[in-house]
Amino acid sequence: MYLIELSNYSIAALGSGNGLNNFYFALSDGDACAVNTDTIDDAHVFLKTLATIVRPESGTFRYKGKVIDFSDYRNLLFFKRKIGYIGQDSAMISNRTIRENLLLKRSFFQNSLSLTLDQNVVRFCKIFKIYEKLDLRPGDLRPVELRMAVAIRELTKSFDVLLLERPEDYFGHNRFDLFNEILKDTLAHGNAVVFFSHDQDFIESFSNRKILISGGTLVKVPA
Amino acid sequence: MIQVAGNIGRKTIHFANHILDLFAFTYRILKLIFKRQEYGRAIVRRVILEQIYFTCVQALSIIVPVALLVGSMLIIEFTKISVQYDLGKITVILLVRELGPIITAFLVILRSATAVTIEIGYMNVLHEIEAFEMAGIDPMRIICLPRLVGITSAVFCLFIVFDLVSIVGGYCLVWFTTHIPMGDFLGQIGKAITAADIAVGIVKAICFGIIITVTSLKHGFQIRKNITQIPPGTSRAAIESVIFCLISNVIISAIFYM
């Protein structure tokens, strides 16, 4: 059984992209899939599709064999919880502190208002140098720090699949190597990852399969 | 002529759709109140308290002076145009039944409804609603429900504050210009207030709270693509809230007093 399986799937175009027409895509546990596209917009919309943020024009989305019903956004929430999405438009809730943002999921699902972070989150905060800024609101952080906070939130989410969009731009030169180390540790547990990157070293290090999205069609690139 | 008729028809259909959307949206939020979900109680309760603090407690510094000014102005005028024993009844009719709820609703619209529309608009444009969803949290439950409960409770509390301050405070302010003893004045008001007045106050608070919250949230959620949509959206939300509050005020008063 595939982790994610999209069949006869079509997605509308976004920006300068072509969209995707009637394609098939399957992802299993342990897959590390590199996406290559004509336009950045197509890669962006494809990752958002896998995150169930973008609704299809047609087709079937199966998550661990279960068909996802897109007719009501509430049906998607359970699946979204299992997907880590580090994209260019990932955001923090601006009227909460970074600490509250990182605790949001736990606060909600465990009915707890405790402000103590998990050890793993604290470790990542120290590595990415935002530990001192946990009690500030997102507006008080520099954009790069904000992106680190988003990354920490997603990496500590206990996801089944991690979606990454241009990590080399997202993390910046200084922190990209650090992120690579963390990603290696994280993926050692057998989680799947789908990413779009221009960094050839990153692609070669992490991918075990590649796909190409060109002119509205999805093609498997032979290894 | 056909174009004019077509235009009127399209606008009417659009308006009817909008009203139906607002009712559907209200129904969905109200349903969440009665759906006793296991998750998110602590955080939802916290957001409700934050909303009450913002809409009610922080608004006291505005509502108290406004109530004093309106109360003193009306009591001065009433003492000139009425004989002494009508003052309590006129005060109840005008301040408690009509002006109090409407002025309070207007202040809440100016202060909180606009803020809610702007906040939700920004959250939508900056993908913060998506962030809630990606955490598996229903935005209706963590954003809409607390605002509905918070703003409605705040409107009800502010009604009481406005009525008390405008009557007692207003009287105190004009005490030196009138010849009416305080005891007589409060006694007249006590006799004039009926159970229907209290019921109307509660009904108006609930209706205005729901109207203000739902209208401002709906317009906030309609802002999707860019930040420049936020000012016109906020303006529409404020104007609609005022109009819907006025209409519902007339309907409620007609039901209870005619």
Image: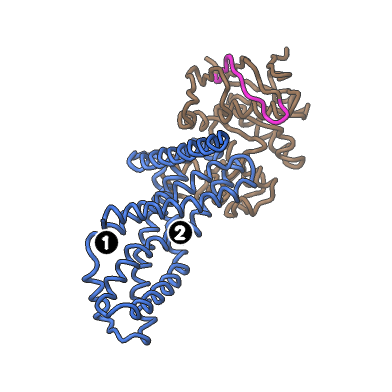
Q: Nearer the viewer, residue B140 or B137?
A: B140
Q: Nearer the viewer, residue A198 or B35?
A: B35
Is the C terminus of chain A in the top left, top right, bottom left or bottom right quadrant?
top right
* Front position among marks 1 and 2: 1
Residue A11 lies within the magenta run: yes
Residue placed under numbered mark 1 in the picture: B197
- In which quadrant of the rendered view does residue B205 lie? bottom left
Q: Residue at x 61, y 45 (%)?
A: B229
Kind of residue at badge 1:
Asp
Q: Does mark 2 fall on the same chain as mark 1?
A: yes
How many numbered callouts?
2
Chain painted blue: B
Which numbered disc covers residue A182?
A: none
- In which quadrant of the rendered view does residue B257 lie? bottom left
Magenta stretch bounds: A3-17
Residue A163 lies within the magenta run: no
Please, what secondary structure does the residue beneath circle 1 have?
Answer: helix
Q: How is the image coloured?
A: by chain
Q: Residue at x 31, y 71 (%)?
A: B91
The crowding category of the residue bearing disc 1, from other C-alpha atoms within 10 Å (few below 14, some 14 to 19, many at least 20), is some
Q: Nearer the viewer, residue A74 or B213?
A: B213
Which numbered disc covers residue B108?
A: 2
- Please determine whether, in this image, residue B136 is positioned above or below residue A99: above
Please, what secondary structure does the residue beneath circle 2 have?
Answer: helix
In space, the residues marked 1 and 2 are separated at their CA atoms by 21 Å
Q: Nearer the viewer, residue B216 or B154?
A: B216
Chain of residue at mark 2: B
Chain painted brown: A
Kind of residue at badge 2:
Val
Judge left or right: residue B39 versus residue A47: left
Q: Residue at x 63, y 24 (%)?
A: A12
